[in-house]
């Protein structure tokens, strides 16, 4: 595969670029542009050729052309990516591995370019990123005031303390993760994976003095970490390997370490799931509903909300009267305990 792709880099080929174009308050149209390009040409190179030689009205953002600024993020063949990073040869190779209706016209490969998702359109491939920046601001991604006071000597961090910031420090604010976020698409209150990845940077920063208040804020409803659906799209499209979902998970763990199961349904969901799997190897769904939604029989409203579902399950013979632990339950327990011991060791190293 590596040899095949490298050959594509040197071959001049005809490619059809199908670009989704749209003005504000108008319906989108698909406009085709034919280019003779080499496989090594980036998508941004090709967009520049279209703008300079075929259609000067095409609108898109660009700046550094070197995977630094994040300006040229857009959807390329259905996924959010940087136009300056992706090249024609790689895109065609991906098309050959997947069945995409309309990926070729009369044997000519097609590359589909569209604007980022989850943000209003301005023109063509340019979107309004106001919500993206506002949600970033909402998590206060700056070292706290106390941490910014000028000390008698410089701030010092150990290599271990600094290494906790490495992944999140790579973020270039391109918007790819925000564009693909399922949670953001259905919940306008969710701040987005980019904001929570930056939020973890503050939680992990040894110079910050607001860790507890930050965690309380990130624990609030579905606008914080509990709004994440764990779809993994943010990790898969991030061009800088920030792994936003991993950072969200780390914030969740910090919250779980400080909270009791009775504090909220989100907390109970996580803790009860682990406890039930540890007890029986898999989830006893009868107990799961009662403990999570019903708060161990303390939440009358929650219990009543389960009644219609329970009655329908009983009427259709789908309500289990007993629970059989899975085979290998002891091994499951051992694994969970081993993970907890590793977490304690890591916590000790951090402290």
Image (cartoon, rainbow, N blue to C red):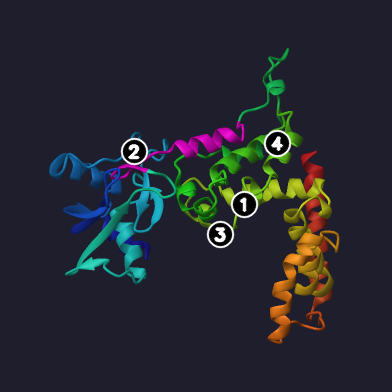
Residues at discs 4 and 1 in contact (Cβ within 8 Å):
no
> 10 Å neighbourhood of mark 4: few (<14), some, or many (≥20)?
some
Q: Residue at x 55, y 51 (%)?
A: 187
Residue 338, x across and y down, in percent = 81, 61
Viewer-nearest residue: 96 or 283: 283
Q: Which mark is residue 227?
A: 1
Q: Is residue 240 above or below residue 92?
A: above
Viewer-nearest residue: 293 or 337: 293
Q: Which residue has dot 3 on it?
A: 231
Q: CA distance from mark 3 to mark 2?
A: 30 Å
Depth check, mark 2 against mark 1: the one in front is: 1
218 left or right of 92 in image: right
Residue 149, x across and y down, in percent = 69, 17
> 10 Å neighbourhood of mark 3: few (<14), some, or many (≥20)?
few
Viewer-nearest residue: 78 or 84: 78
Q: CA distance from mark 3 to mark 1?
A: 11 Å
Q: CA distance from mark 2 to mark 1?
A: 34 Å
Viewer-nearest residue: 227 or 318: 318
Q: Which quarter of the image is occupied by the C terminus? A: top right
Q: Which residue has dot 4 on it?
A: 214
305 left or right of 345 in image: left
């Amino acid at each position: 595969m590596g040899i095949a792709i490298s050959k594509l880099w040197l071959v001049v080929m005809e490619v059809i670029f199908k670009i989704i174009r749209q003005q504000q308050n108008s319906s989108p149209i698909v406009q085709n542009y034919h280019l003779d390009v080499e496989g090594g040409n980036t998508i941004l190179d090709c967009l520049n050729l279209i703008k300079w030689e075929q259609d000067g009205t095409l609108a898109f953002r660009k700046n550094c052309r070197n995977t630094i600024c994040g300006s040229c993020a857009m959807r390329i063949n259905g996924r959010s990516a940087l136009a300056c990073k992706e090249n024609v040869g790689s895109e065609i190779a991906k098309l050959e591995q997947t069945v995409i209706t309309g990926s070729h016209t009369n044997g000519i490969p097609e590359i589909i370019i569209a604007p980022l998702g989850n943000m209003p359109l301005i023109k063509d491939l340019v979107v309004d990123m106001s919500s993206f920046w506002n949600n970033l601001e909402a998590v206060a991604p700056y070292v706290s005031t106390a941490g910014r006071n000028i000390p008698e000597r410089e701030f010092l961090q150990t290599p271990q303390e600094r290494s906790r910031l490495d992944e999140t420090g790579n973020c270039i604010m391109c918007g790819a993760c925000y564009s693909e976020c399922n949670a953001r698409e259905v919940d306008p209150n969710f701040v987005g994976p980019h904001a929570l990845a930056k939020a973890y940077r503050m939680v992990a920063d040894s110079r910050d003095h607001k860790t507890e208040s930050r965690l309380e804020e990130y624990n609030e409803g579905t606008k914080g970490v509990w709004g994440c659906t764990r779809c993994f799209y943010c990790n898969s499209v991030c061009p800088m390997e920030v792994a936003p979902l991993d950072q969200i998970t780390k914030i969740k763990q910090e919250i779980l370490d400080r909270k009791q199961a009775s504090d909220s349904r989100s907390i109970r969901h996580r803790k009860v799931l682990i406890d039930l799997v540890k007890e029986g190897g898999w989830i006893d769904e009868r107990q799961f509903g009662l403990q999570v939604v019903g708060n161990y029989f303390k939440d009358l409203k929650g219990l009543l909300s389960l009644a219609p579902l329970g009655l329908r399950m009983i009427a259709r013979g789908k309500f289990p009267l007993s629970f059989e632990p899975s085979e290998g339950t002891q091994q499951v327990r051992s694994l969970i305990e081993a993970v907890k011991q590793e977490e304690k060791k890591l916590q000790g190293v951090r402290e």
